[in-house]
Amino acid sequence: MKKIKITEIKGVKIGHAQNIKGATGCTVILCQEGGVAGVDVRGGAPASRETELLKSENTVEKVHGIFLSGGSAYGLDAAAGIMEYLEKNKKGFKVRGEIVPIVCGSSLFDLIVGDPKCRPDKKMGYEACLNSEKEEIKEGNVGAGTGASIGKINGIENAMKGGLGIYAIQLGELKVGAVVAVNAFGDVIDIDTNEILAGLLNKEKNKLISTEEEMYSQYENLSKDTFSGNTTIGCIITNAKLTKAQMNKLASISHNAYAKAISPVQTTVDGDAIFTLTTGEVEVNLDVVGALATKVMGKAINRGILKAKSAYNLKSAEEMRKI
């Protein structure tokens, strides 16, 4: 087994676009020839597009793009730009001589970080597609991770900077990668040491404290307003030859990484979701892919935090390590 660049998974391209001043952005994962996909949404407050068609019993077998964006439900507008890009390239589901690109995605809530009127839109979605042609690997304060934050039980004032992480590995001919925008209500845990990497800060902002323990201490007076602004959204990308039903199962298995790397996770005010996408080239056992997917997603979550830079009055894990 070896670590690889996620761009080594042929047939898939990743691009980002962002508005730094507005503190929001969009990440797009393109599979222009179409890839079998799945999804598992477990958070209680999701903002998603075209997840119904990914159900195993529904007609469409392949998608052409998956996006992760900021902007809450407003950010779903980025899909229009992705569809325009794919249509111009004549990629999509053929219906009576016409082309309909199939684009799925989810948005996270970052409106409390920057300018709430600045949101991913059609133009940003199209720009992300253009940037995917460069085949660059960017992490941290980019794309959907631009305005991401974590550890928000005591408000954004005591939260830390989240970000976008990427990680991929190869086992024989099998390749599995993950892209994730980490914007959790809870803390992010190092999957190797089980220590808190980043999350809730104390009042002095010089020490990390446990969100879980803070929840217990406030159990009688927690309000939903203190929970606002969450959701971790990601995508597993592979070349495994799997059916649509298996891809949906893979999405479910991959949520094990969220449980390992985020605490608490999948709350009623998170919209946590994982998409899966495959180019379908390598015959392999689903459980093997699931184990690898859990590994790369956990690593990607950690990298999203470790690659983030301090911004918008939010301290990064890198800055806290220097204190």
Image (tube, rainbow, N blue to C red):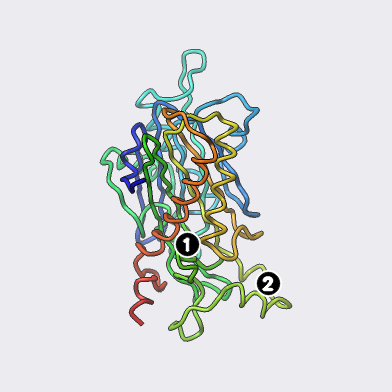
Which one is in front, 264 or 141? 264
Q: Which mark is residue 70?
A: none
The spot of residue 215 in percent (x, y) is 64, 74
| The N terminus lies in quadrant | top left
**Dot 2: what SS?**
loop
Residue 181 occupies quadrant: bottom left
**Number of residue marks:** 2
Judge whether 211 appears above or below 94 on screen.
Answer: below
**Dot 1: what SS?**
loop
Amino acid type indicated by mark 1? Ile
Amino acid type indicated by mark 2? Ser
- Residue wearing tag 2: 223
The spot of residue 204 in percent (x, y) is 47, 86
Which one is in front, 295 or 51? 295
Alpha carbons under labels 2 and 1: distance apart:
30 Å
The spot of residue 149 in percent (x, y) is 47, 65
Camera-nearest label, 2 or 1 = 1
Q: Which mark is residue 191?
A: 1
Say few, some or many: other residues with alpha carbon within 10 Å of mark 1 (under 14 / 14 to 19 / 20 or more): many
Say few, some or many: other residues with alpha carbon within 10 Å of mark 2 (under 14 / 14 to 19 / 20 or more): few
